């Protein structure tokens, strides 16, 4: 595509939030020399931090899309020039790998806590001729710094360990090229695989990366879904629960009764004119969408791996690996036997009571002040707002937080991660999403599990061949447990019992899981 953005514009401001991140006052102007365009916007988010004690900080992944004449939304790339940050704000282009300019990380420039405010951010963008509708998106992220960390513990099922006969954890001290797997002492052992060798391109977590602070909210999935074409929407729904032409009020995932999922058709699509549907949130069922009590901050679920891959590719992110999952939970600390993401092996297990249900301030009125709080099968068989256990007085344990501040790594819904347990997973080389999907709405990135419809768990998916994209689940595993699991073992950091990657062609064999959500990562510069 070669089109130049010129005034006037139709600008839509979107809030994709779990802790009230707001992207506002978006405008586009010339850069002063009339050789390019500059996008300007304001950004605020709550519960922000930068701390020396953990050497990390939170931030926001900001990206923009524009709608072309064919009705397709394309990524609006940053150029990396003409960047102006207000006092107190810093940025990172997230240009690791070959995918550049898809988005920008914005975060605190100095240590601090509380609401972060960045007013008047400016950045150069691609310049195309024409008038386009622009939408902005913002995802709260956490920076996980580089360095050594430990995998596995002494008790968890199928836990990583040092050598096949030892129960001791394994320390990752190098990138993929220096991490070997096998059955000998001193090597990373995976009880799911007889593989012996190195994993040179596999993201081990040793290098720094950014991770979504929360599992994707229903509001976040709504915003993504509303940029898809009719065909892409149909393929995401696959006629199991609904299709884009379904009547107003039709649930798009058929799970509201069991787990507080409120995404519905607000304006039906039209297959004849290829007009996509508009979906919204409607917790109170009055067909008035996206009200303050309609649940957009509650975590979204009922996804397959191809659904997750599609969102991550669209957002310019990538799936995490199992090793990165454990680092985000544990940090550099020595493993505790049977520990959860908050670093202890104790967990609150009584039923929770929800207050301010469906709002941005949804909270738990009877959470524990001393035990790790976790949305588990023994606490509440339903989904909750992302970050619900973090309060102004909570500790890492009572907030149920990972070492670096990532929320709900144990419980709520399971995380999808790339496994080392088969070749379909081990061949993953960390390719980043580029913001573009196939015409069917699938991810199309090289070496992502299931790309090209690869159903062979012991076959590397290879480079995207121009076909259907990601539609199989070979090479993935569920980590961290979901709210439907009664056995607390599944919520443990090192437990690897929830294995999915059996090579099912999910496009033709629907296996949506009511406890699987969306959380992605992106490499740091």
Image (cartoon, rainbow, N blue to C red):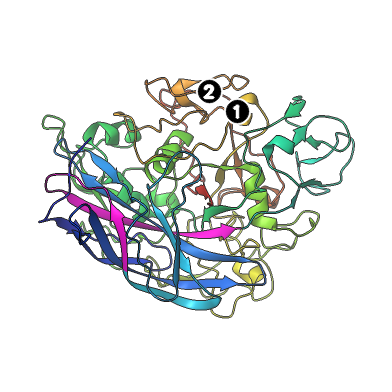
Q: Residue at x 44, y 27 (%)?
A: 471
Give the residues drawn in magenta, as a range: 121-144
Residue at 19% x, 42% y is 247
**Residue 190 appearing in the image:** no
Marks 1 and 2 close (CB-CB < 8 Å): yes
Q: Is residue 202 above or below residue 299?
A: above
Quadrant (top left/top right/bottom left/bottom right) for the N terminus = top left
Q: Position of residue 332 (x, y in %)?
A: 73, 58
**Magenta-colored segment: predominant secondary structure:** strand
Q: Which residue in the structure is indicated by mark 1?
A: 427
Mark 1 closeness class: few <14, some 14–19, many ≥20 residues within 10 Å: many
Residue pushed farthest bottom? 393
Q: Distance of mark 1 from mark 2, alpha carbons?
A: 7 Å
Question: Residue 156: image x %, image y %?
Answer: 77, 46
> Within the image, what quadrant is residue 111 found in?
bottom right
Where residue 56 appears, x then y in whole percent?
A: 60, 65
**Does 233 appear in magenta?**
no
Residue receiving disc 2: 461
Which of 453/426 is in front? Answer: 426
Q: Is residue 397 left or right of residue 318?
A: right
Q: Decide whether residue 135 is among the magenta residues.
A: yes
Q: Which residue is at 44% across, 33% downward?
A: 306
């Amino acid at each position: 595509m070669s089109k130049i953005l010129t005034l006037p514009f139709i600008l839509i401001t979107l809030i994709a939030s779990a802790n009230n991140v707001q992207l506002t006052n978006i405008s586009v102007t010339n850069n002063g020399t009339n050789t390019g365009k500059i996008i300007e916007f304001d950004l605020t988010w709550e519960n922000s931090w930068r701390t020396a004690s953990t050497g990390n900080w939170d931030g926001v992944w900001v990206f923009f899309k524009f709608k072309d004449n064919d009705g397709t939304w394309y990524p609006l790339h940053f150029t990396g020039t003409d960047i102006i940050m207000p006092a107190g704000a810093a940025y990172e282009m997230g240009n690791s790998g070959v995918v550049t300019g898809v988005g920008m990380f914005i975060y605190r420039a100095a240590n601090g806590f509380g609401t972060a405010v960045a007013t008047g951010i400016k950045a150069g963008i691609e310049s195309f001729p024409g008038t386009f509708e622009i939408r902005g998106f913002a995802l709260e992220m956490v920076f996980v710094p580089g360095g050594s960390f430990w995998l596995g513990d002494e008790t968890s099922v199928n836990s990583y360990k040092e050598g096949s006969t030892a129960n001791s954890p394994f320390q990752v001290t190098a990138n993929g090229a220096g991490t070997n797997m096998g059955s000998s002492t001193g090597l990373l052992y995976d009880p799911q695989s007889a593989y012996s060798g190195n994993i040179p391109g596999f993201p081990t977590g040793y290098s720094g990366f950014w991770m979504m602070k929360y599992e994707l909210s229903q509001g976040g999935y709504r915003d993504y879904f509303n940029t898809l074409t009719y065909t892409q929407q149909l393929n995401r729904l696959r006629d199991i629960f609904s299709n884009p032409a379904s009547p107003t009020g039709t649930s798009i995932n058929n799970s509201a009764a069991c787990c507080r999922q409120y995404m519905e058709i607000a304006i039906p699509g039209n297959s004849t004119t290829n007009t996509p549907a508009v979906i919204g949130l409607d917790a109170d069922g009055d067909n008035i969408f996206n009200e303050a009590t309609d649940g957009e901050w509650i975590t979204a679920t009922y996804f397959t791996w191809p659904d997750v891959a599609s969102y991550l590719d669209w957002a310019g992110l990538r799936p995490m690996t199992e090793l990165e999952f454990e680092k985000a939970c544990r940090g550099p600390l020595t493993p505790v036997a049977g520990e959860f993401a908050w670093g202890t092996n104790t967990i609150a297990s009584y039923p929770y009571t929800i207050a301010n249900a469906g709002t941005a301030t949804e909270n738990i009125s009877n959470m524990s002040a001393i035990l790790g709080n976790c949305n588990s099968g023994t606490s509440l068989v339903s989904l909750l707002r992302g970050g619900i256990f973090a309060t102004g007085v909570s500790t890492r344990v009572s907030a149920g937080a990972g070492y670096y501040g990532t929320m709900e790594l144990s419980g709520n819904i399971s995380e999808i991660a790339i496994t080392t347990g088969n070749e379909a997973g081990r061949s993953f080389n960390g390719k980043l999403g580029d913001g573009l999907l196939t015409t069917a709405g699938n991810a199309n990135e090289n070496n992502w599990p299931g790309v090209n419809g690869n159903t062979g768990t012991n076959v590397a998916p290879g480079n995207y061949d121009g076909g259907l994209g990601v539609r199989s689940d070979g090479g993935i595993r569920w980590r961290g447990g979901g709210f439907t699991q009664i056995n607390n073992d599944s919520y443990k950091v090192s437990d690897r019992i929830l294995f999915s990657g059996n090579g099912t062609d999910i496009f033709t064999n629907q296996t949506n899981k009511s406890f699987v959500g969306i959380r992605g990562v992106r490499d740091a510069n």
